Image (cartoon, rainbow, N blue to C red):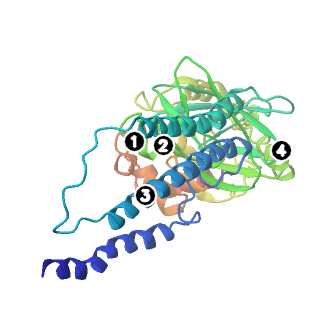
């Protein structure tokens, strides 16, 4: 009885379907926050609206077509002694109908799509905060010209105020994508692209490079930190204190500046310049003896050649991310590692193990030195 066997198998065939359903039901924004389906800005809502419209049309088509198919299967099911059904080649009326319906559906989808393209391409007006986004292999630089501060891998935006991102690349083509706030926008060397959004919720949200840009493309993430206007002002005020050290506290300030502006770690190491580790009074952990040691190592090991520690007047064209606030960042290594002491030390000691091919070389840092460097960097918040 082949029919019986097939019927018995039917419930079993539903199992993978049900498993898939359970899997999809388990997708929650808490676990997968990098989604464009939960928009948190005006810009993202435009894209989400187009997506919703398209989805509902597709759902309608699916239900109608599958419904008609199932109806036909059961209603006109062939019996063993049925005669051969009449053969028809074509029906002009039906051909016209099923050409017209998709054309109308496409037109209905095109209207919000084209409207959305014009809306998102328009330049924002009014009280707009301009932020420069610079893609690097493999991290993101954010410069806030209105505030004269710089951050790396964390984009700080105020809730309720439009930000316009002016984007560029220092090397190859990347694509900036903060899914909760905006769409993807490619960044190019030597050409500026723009995108804008007005965040409507505070919090920390992930973003990602969305264009293959080399071996560590997948680990070129960033965080968007959206905060209330008052919190944002407090943050900006704090950032403005993270400027260059007064000349007295930074002996041979010129040589340090030169190294910051263009030095590379492959070049000769900056020599130790005596016990000049003057405590920075603005730094909370400056009393920590590890801090002074770390400060010296930061110069001796050549870290200073690629990384600036000042958020104000930060030098342009640095190879490595700005570290002025590295101590308080949620992640390090461009969103790849949680910013724990253990991870920070591991990252300093073995960057090539953590992110193979990254421009930061293994500098032969010992475990003890990594601890000191970690203490020094942790104090930069
Ligand atoms: Cu940068 Cu992919």
Residue 35 % position (x, y): 56, 53
SS class, disc 1: loop
Q: Which mark is residue 145?
A: none
Front residue of 100 and 244: 100
Front residue of 218 and 24: 24
Q: Residue at horizontal 49%, vertical 48%?
A: 333
Which residue is tagged 1?
A: 216
Q: Which mark is residue 237?
A: 4
Front residue of 38 and 208: 38
SS class, disc 4: helix
Q: Residue at horizontal 49%, vertical 32%?
A: 174
Q: Residue at horizontal 71%, vertical 45%?
A: 156
Which residue is tagged 3?
A: 68
Which residue is tagged 2?
A: 220
Mark 2 vs 1: CB contact within 8 A: yes
SS class, disc 3: helix
């Amino acid at each position: 009885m082949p029919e019986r066997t097939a019927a018995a198998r039917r419930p079993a065939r539903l199992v993978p379907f049900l498993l898939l359903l359970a899997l999809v039901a388990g997708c929650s924004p808490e676990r997968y926050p990098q989604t464009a389906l939960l928009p948190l800005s005006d810009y993202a809502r435009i894209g989400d609206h187009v997506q919703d419209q398209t989805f509902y049309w597709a759902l309608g088509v699916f239900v109608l077509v599958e419904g008609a198919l199932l109806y036909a299967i059961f209603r006109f099911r062939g019996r063993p002694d049925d005669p051969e059904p009449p053969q028809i080649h074509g029906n002009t009326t039906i051909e016209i109908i099923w050409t017209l319906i998709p054309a109308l559906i496409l037109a209905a989808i095109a209207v919000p799509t084209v409207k959305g393209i014009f809306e998102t391409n328009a330049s924002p007006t009014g009280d707009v905060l301009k932020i420069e986004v610079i893609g690097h292999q493999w991290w993101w630089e954010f410069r806030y010209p209105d505030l004269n501060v710089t951050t790396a891998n964390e984009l700080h935006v105020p809730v309720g105020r439009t930000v316009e991102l002016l984007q560029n690349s220092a090397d190859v083509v990347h694509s900036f994508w903060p899914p909760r706030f905006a769409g993807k926008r490619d960044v190019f060397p030597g050409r500026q692209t723009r995108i804008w959004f007005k965040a409507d919720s505070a919090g920390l949200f992930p973003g990602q490079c969305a264009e293959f840009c080399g071996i560590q493309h997948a680990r070129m993430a960033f965080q968007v930190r959206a905060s209330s206007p008052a919190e944002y002002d407090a943050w900006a005020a704090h950032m403005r204190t993270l400027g260059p050290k007064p000349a007295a506290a930074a002996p041979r300030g010129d040589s340090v500046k030169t190294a910051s502006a263009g030095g590379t770690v492959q070049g000769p190491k900056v020599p130790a310049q005596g016990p000049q580790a003057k405590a920075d009074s603005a730094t909370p952990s400056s009393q920590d003896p590890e801090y002074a040691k770390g400060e010296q190592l930061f110069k001796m090991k050549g870290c200073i050649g690629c990384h600036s520690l000042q958020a104000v007047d930060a030098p342009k064209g640095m190879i490595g991310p700005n570290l002025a606030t590295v101590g308080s960042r949620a992640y390090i290594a461009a969103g790849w590692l949680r910013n724990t002491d253990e991870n920070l030390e591991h990252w300093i000691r073995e960057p090539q193990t953590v992110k193979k091919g990254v421009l930061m070389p293994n500098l032969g840092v010992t475990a003890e030195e990594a601890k000191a460097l970690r203490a020094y960097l942790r104090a930069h918040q």
